[in-house]
Amino acid sequence: MTKACKLAAGNWKMNGLRADLEQARILAQAIAKPNCGVLLCPPATLIAAMADAVAGTAVMVGGQDCHAQISGAHTGDVSAQMLVDSGARYVILGHSERRADHGESSVDVAAKAGAAHGAGLVAIICVGETEAERDSGQTLDVVLGQLAASLPEGATAANTVIAYEPVWAIGTGRTPTLEQIAEVHDALRESLPDAAISLLYGGSVKPGNATEIFAIANVDGALVGGASLKAEDFGAIISALGAA
Ligand code: PGA
């Protein structure tokens, strides 16, 4: 069996102006030859400028969403091909903030992922339970249900990454226990169409907890929000993943 690739992915969410590209430049210098894939997903307004800023370095650039259609009358939306044209190689899809703020269903996410694959992007598909779902013992049902419905036809390790992000752990400083993360990642691995698809954990990953999370067997990396905004913090997480 081919082993899953390690990936540290930063999700800047709706943060970052052109001045903040300096953090991407500092990161690229600091991690010259990382032992894992390194990705930054800035807001759409910064993708092209960031791709220029980190050209020729190990840092790859991605988007945070794309439309399911190739082009057309969809005011305010961005297509997968536009992301590629701006220098993106990845796109985050089905983040819980988009599922909550924009009512995206897993069916929508699968359509977007199919569009991303068609344009040559790697889709990072996010799944995760709410606190109420965890408290009522539904975590595995919810997460595996989202996975099955969000994966498009033809998903392989070459075009797809899965991120397990418990909704209640995002931006809260709270994380599941290592056993809880392991339980979900083991179940996800069993359910993947291609066992070499990388499985990221996301939700309050910081330099201080990265090493113990990356030591979990089926964790291949992280999707990092707040701690990816500062080169120093994200660099420390990348080092921890490289050493795992
Ligand atoms: P966080 O966000 O690291 O700030 O918790 C993770 C994410 O939402 O991808």
Image (tube, rainbow, N blue to C red):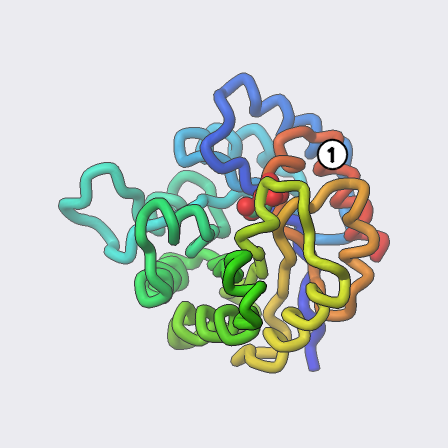
Identity of the residue furthest to the left in this view? 73
Q: Is mark 1 within 8 Å of ligand 1?
A: no
Depth check: give the residue in front, 108 or 31: 108
Q: Residue 74's quadrant in the figure? A: top left
Query: What type is the residue that disc 1 sits on?
Result: Asp
Question: Quick one: quadrant of the N terminus?
Answer: bottom right
- Foreground residue among 124 and 48: 124
Please report the residue visible at 31 percent of the width from the left and 61 percent of the height from the top. 108
On-image quarter of the C terminus: bottom right
- Name the spot of residue 119 as percent of width and height, x first: 37, 57
Label 1 crowd (10 A; few <14 / some 14-19 / many >=20): some
* 60 in relation to 131, above or below: above
Residue 217 image point, x, y percent: 77, 69
Residue with the most extreme front position: 136
Residue 218 sits above or below residue 52 on the image: below
Secondary structure type for disc 1: helix
Q: Position of residue 72 (x, y in %)?
A: 16, 48
Residue placed under numbered mark 1 in the picture:
233
Left or right: residue 63 compared with residue 174 = left
Q: Quadrant of ligand 1?
A: top right
Which residue occupies the foreground of this view, 105 or 217?
105
Residue 19: x and y, percent?
54, 17
Residue plotted at (45% across, 56% down): 121
